[in-house]
Amino acid sequence: MTKTTNSHCIGSTKTDLIRPRFTAFFVALPLLSTLAVGCVDTTDPAPAEVRTATGDDVAVYGVLKEIMLKADYASKVQLADVAVADAGFGVGAIEGLRGEITIAQDRAWLSYPEGDDAVRSVKLETNEEQAALLVFTRVTSWLDTELTNDVDFDTLDASLVQAMADLELDPEIARPFTIEGKVARIDWHVIDGSQLPDGMATHADHQNASVKGTLKNADVQLVGFRSTQHQGVFTHSGQTLHIHVIHPESGLSAHVDSLEIETGTVLRLANEFGTQ
């Protein structure tokens, strides 16, 4: 069983999660976070720090292609420098690809690999940790709806686009979203950069350098960003989504590789958000 150590101000506990898988996907940043695997685009990546074309709505620190092609795992921002506890919302990877970052609920949820089958998770209001990749904003207003169909990772984007059309939201800008409630299945991973080879690493290398697991019929919060403008920056080529999961019962946060969500699950789309 994959074990999660939940570190808080007072001691720590260990909780069994549903079975680990050790064929990982790498994901979006480090993580496959997972979005789908594919050939690596070898065109020149964007600069080391990029902001979205929509101005200051979403801040992006680091570039996925540089992580993949140039093994650039260096710090791009310190978490203490972003407003985590002020409606902060974000996903990313820790400097050195030492784990995953998820920002929600006025907390930074950090997960670190421990060996081949364990994850240590920490939830803090402020943190001195550094990020090799971070997509971040502050969401001050959400619009709530429900998924009208069962979805998996491949069909979620179309459901988001339809929901944005119904709510008269612009689908062309980078937009945060969250899905809350019971999900049928989530396959997740936490990257372990210490297991990667020196220099450029393939998707297979990243897949083999992660602690992986599965949640079934679990109450979770999915923390995600959708963008058609950031392929190679915070999503993989041909992908529009970067999603993490928070499992409050165990304290786990991780990159999402695949998912199965049923009709009627609550979907929240960011209405008012920005970095200022």
Image (cartoon, grey):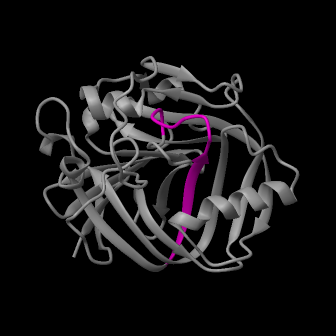
For the C terminus, the image quarter is: top right
Image vertical order of residue 237 relative to residue 132, above or below: below
Q: Nearer the viewer, residue 192 or 48?
A: 48
For the N terminus, the image quarter is: bottom left
- In the rendered structure, does residue 229 fall within the stretch colored magenta? yes
Q: Answer with left or right where residue 119 lies relative to residue 43.
A: left
Residue 119's spot in the image, x, y percent?
26, 58
Q: Nearer the viewer, residue 93 or 173?
A: 173
Q: How many marks?
A: 0
Residue 217's spot in the image, x, y percent?
49, 82
Q: Which residues are magenta?
A: 218-234
Q: Residue at x 11, y 38 (%)?
A: 197
Residue 51's spot in the image, x, y percent?
59, 23
Q: Residue at x 70, y 22 (%)?
A: 55
Q: Is residue 129 visible?
A: no
Residue 133's spot in the image, x, y percent?
41, 33
Q: Answer with left or right where residue 120 lies relative to residue 123.
A: left
Q: Residue at x 20, y 32 (%)?
A: 200
Q: Residue at x 60, y 64 (%)?
A: 156
Q: Answer with left or right where residue 104 lies relative to residue 275.
A: left
Tell me the quarter of the picture where residue 65 sits.
Answer: top left
